[in-house]
Amino acid sequence: MERLEVLKTYKIYIGGQFPRTESGRYYDPKNAQGQALANICLSSRKDLRNAVVAARKAFGGWAERAHFNRGQILYRIAEMLEGRKAQFVEELMKQGSTKAAAEKEVDQSTDLLVYYSGWADKYQQLFSSVNPVASSHFNFSALEPMGVVGIVAPQDTSLFGLVSSIIPVITGGNTVVVLASEKLPLCAVTFAEVLNSSDVPGGVVNILTGKESELLEQFATHMDINAVLYGGGDAKNYIRLKELGTDNVKRVFNFDGAETENPYLIADFQEVKTTWHPIENIGGSTSTY
């Protein structure tokens, strides 16, 4: 008798754990021949709320880590991704990539992680400043992470779009809740396995799978999501996100994937904190207190 194929069930990733969707719903993306690839969780709004709670809980510890240590952790992700290259190539090929294109996508993703690991302890020096003021003060501006960032990953790539949207945001100390590509979801959950086996604390990156149409409004209206990075490629949905996000003055950024190696992508998800320090002039000399 012909043996039935046992399809892998890809679960979601919340708070460093791999739960099934609370809704119990699944969908099966197809390849070009119409064959089912896997069982993929169809995440609900409750899953998204749970992911935001996990991201908020992880934010304080991640934001307070030494920048150099965040760079070490990003480099560790690159090491783990490189070690599982064959698995990612196989999954990309299942979803329609050629072998050459799949290998290139994994290499680009790994290289991007290394790139941002180098920026982790340098962007603060680049974007911070000492500001000239007319009064007897020193005036400093420094960057601080926004908080929890919602990400709708690009729909046309399975791995590189996911990595290129997540990494600049967490490099700056933010935590994220990500909705992976609906049509090409396999690498997203496998990348979560990479994160889980590296040094990334649970809750820093939370990955959901499912339909943009069901969760887009929740990304925009959730009051504990501080910003949204939209890579879905639909201009109407981007405008809708901006409109709905006004209730908590949520910043909404459009991510087209045109430029992925850019430290300004880190700065986009930072708040500028300005500090005034008084100066006392005593006998012609300057001192601070």
Image: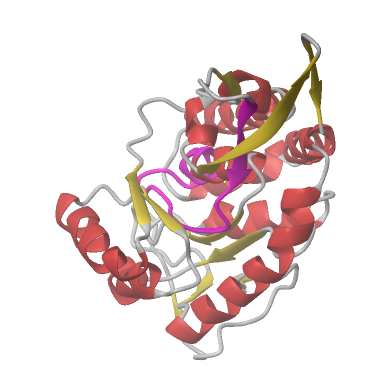
Vertical side of 220 occupied by 142: above or below: above
For the point 35% across and 73% down, which residue is it? Answer: 221
Q: Is residue 87 magenta?
A: no
- List x then y, in percent, for residue 50: 59, 80
Q: In what quadrant of the picture does the C terminus appear?
A: top right
Q: Find residue 29 and report its image quarter.
A: bottom left
Q: In what quadrant of the picture does the N terminus appear?
A: bottom right
Left or right of 7 in this view: 192: right
State the scheme by which the image is colored. Answer: secondary structure
User: Seen from this angle, which residue lies furthest left?
Assistant: 236
Residue 14 visible? The answer is no
Tell me which segment is drawn in magenta.
137-164
Which one is in front, 131 or 180? Answer: 131
Left or right of 191 in this view: 148: left
- List x then y, in percent, for residue 63: 72, 50
Q: Is residue 141 magenta?
A: yes
- List x then y, in percent, for residue 8: 62, 70
Residue 110 visible? The answer is yes
Which one is in front, 211 or 204? Answer: 204
Vertical side of 256 occupied by 215: above or below: below
For the point 84% across and 38% down, which residue is it? Answer: 69
Which one is in front, 5 or 100? Answer: 100
For the point 37% across and 53% down, which residue is it? Answer: 251
User: Seen from this angle, which residue lies furthest front?
Assistant: 283
Which one is in front, 10 or 201? Answer: 201
Vertical side of 134 occupied by 43: above or below: below
Q: Find residue 189 and report its image quarter.
A: bottom right
- List x then y, in percent, for residue 259: 41, 25
Vertical side of 185 occupied by 253: above or below: above
For the point 70% across and 73% down, which residue is it? Answer: 18
